[in-house]
């Protein structure tokens, strides 16, 4: 959700005035959705969350954990790219974001391992 919020926050003022051709997003599919309309982007995010939630719940434990890790790392990286280029001290903020993501991943997996035992 952070990646999504920062992506919307990072759009140019003219984008919000209706010039959706100015969409700025590295993911080609979501860039296309942003170029259609911000609500299309939001619908795409909802579909993304829904599809991967089902996939993660349906797959065996190791596969679901691998996909979960890939999603977390991908979105942390996506948010970090915005942070690095938009905010002062962005590099350091992005490093802190990766640290926070790592802490949350480890805590979640430890808790999951305890409940699975």
Image (cartoon, rainbow, N blue to C red):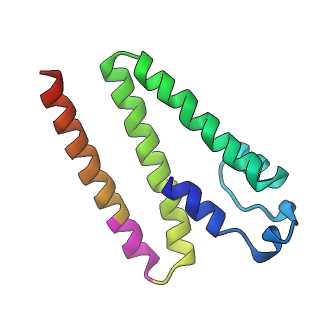
For the record, the magenta segment spans 89-96
- In front here: 39 or 77? 39
On the image, the x and y values in percent for residue 42 come to 67, 48
55 to the left or right of 41: left
Q: Is residue 24 above or below residue 51?
A: below
Q: Nearer the viewer, residue 72 or 44?
A: 44
Outermost residue, bottom side: 88
Residue sitting nearer the eye, 66 or 2 = 2
Q: Quadrant of the C terminus?
A: top left
Tell whether position 92 is magenta: yes
Q: Residue at x 29, y 60 (%)?
A: 99
Q: How many marks?
A: 0
Q: Residue at x 31, y 20 (%)?
A: 61
Q: Is residue 77 above or below residue 19?
A: above
Q: Position of residue 103 (x, y in %)?
A: 24, 53
Q: How would you classify the magenta stretch by its main secondary structure? A: helix
- Residue 4 location, x and y as percent? 58, 55
Residue 57 located left or right of residue 117? right
Determine which quarter of the picture holds residue 97: bottom left
The residue at 49%/22% (across/down) is 55
107 on left or right of 48? left
Q: Is residue 64 above or below residue 11?
A: above
What residue is drawn where x is 68% and y is 57%?
25
């Amino acid at each position: 959700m952070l990646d999504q919020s920062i992506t919307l926050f990072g759009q140019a003022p003219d984008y919000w005035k209706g010039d959706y051709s100015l969409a700025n997003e590295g993911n080609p599919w979501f860039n296309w959705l942003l170029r259609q309309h911000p609500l299309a982007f939001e619908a795409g995010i909802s579909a993304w969350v829904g599809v991967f939630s089902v996939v993660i719940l349906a797959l065996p434990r190791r596969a679901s954990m691998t996909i979960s890790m890939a999603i977390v790392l991908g979105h942390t990286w996506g948010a970090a790219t915005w942070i690095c280029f938009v905010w002062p001290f962005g590099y350091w903020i992005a490093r802190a974001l990766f640290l926070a993501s790592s802490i949350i991943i480890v805590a979640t997996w430890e808790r999951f391992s305890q409940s699975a035992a």
